[in-house]
Amino acid sequence: MRHPSFEFHCIPVGIDNCYLLRGRTTILIDAGAPGHVKEFMRGMDRLGISLREIELILLTHGHADHIGCLHQIQTLSEAEIAMHEAECAWVESGEPDLSPGVTLWGRMLAGLGQVLYKPRLYPRAVDYSITTTLSSLMKLGYGVPGQVVHTPGHWPGSISVLLESGEVFVGDLAMNAWYLRSTPGLPILAQDMDLVVQSWKRLIGMGARQVYPAHGADFPIEIIQKEIQAWERRSGTP
């Protein structure tokens, strides 16, 4: 996708979408699933972009499928790493946890993950720890027309990147992959669904119009609005 003096690209890395934001410099959102760094390299080659052009790796949160190739990508690019302060310990220890399920299928996946999903991750130091106060105001700079927004719910330190033009990169605040849910919508894995809904209301109020999840293709915000209405009817919350 292109805007005046700015463009962004999706690079699938295993089950995770990474997004490359290119303004005056280049920001990478998330670092892909473990064991798939070659896919990332091929994606960069297709775009004709050198890894050394990446100046910042911004992590939406610290789950393994979002930080799995962080060690290799950061080593090759020498980019700095930024994420919310609540997630830093997972990256710096290399031992992230998993979110619980909020649907029957989500609970089944979470249970299987606890038993079967034990990827080997390499610890990596975080250069910029974003606080909750700053994350709601943090302008990206780097020639990227947008800001970082703290959007907890999937996990306490989840963040999203909202562009001025309405595209929003949300990590796991939404999902649209066949192995997670059959249609696009709210996450099936989350620590607190009420917070997920609050975060989405905030993003909608800030002008979000097209959703770019970490899992699956992008979709319009109207789908999330309908999902919120359905969630509130089921849960009895306004």
Image (cartoon, helix red, strand yellow):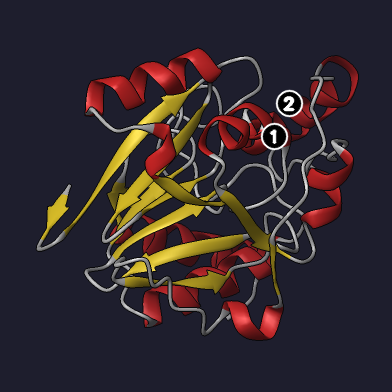
Kindly identify the residue that appears in the image at 78 percent across and 49 percent down: 125
Towards the viewer: 220 or 155? 155
Say whether residue 59 is visible.
no
Say whether residue 113 is visible.
yes
Image marks 1 and 2: residues in contact by CB distance under 8 Å: yes
The kind of residue tagged 2 is Leu
The kind of residue tagged 1 is Gly
Quadrant housing the C terminus: bottom right
Q: Which residue is mark 2?
A: 109
The label shown at residue 71 is none
* x and y, in percent, of residue 237 in the image: 63, 76
Q: Quadrant of residue 208?
A: bottom left
Kindly identify the residue that appears in the image at 66 percent across and 51 percent down: 61
Dot 2: few (<14), some (14–19), or many (≥20) neighbours within 10 Å? Answer: some
Between the residue at mark 1 and the residue at mark 2, the CA separation in whole angstroms equals: 5 Å
Q: Secondary structure at mark 1?
A: helix
Q: Is residue 42 above or below residue 186?
A: above
Left or right of 78: which side holds 107? right
Kindly identify the residue that appears in the image at 37 percent across and 81 percent down: 206
* x and y, in percent, of residue 72 in the image: 62, 26
Q: Which residue is mark 1?
A: 106
Extreme-left residue of the structure: 4
Towards the viewer: 118 or 50? 50
Q: Is residue 58 above or below residue 63?
A: below
All told, the count of numbered labels is: 2
Left or right of 141: which side holds 62? right
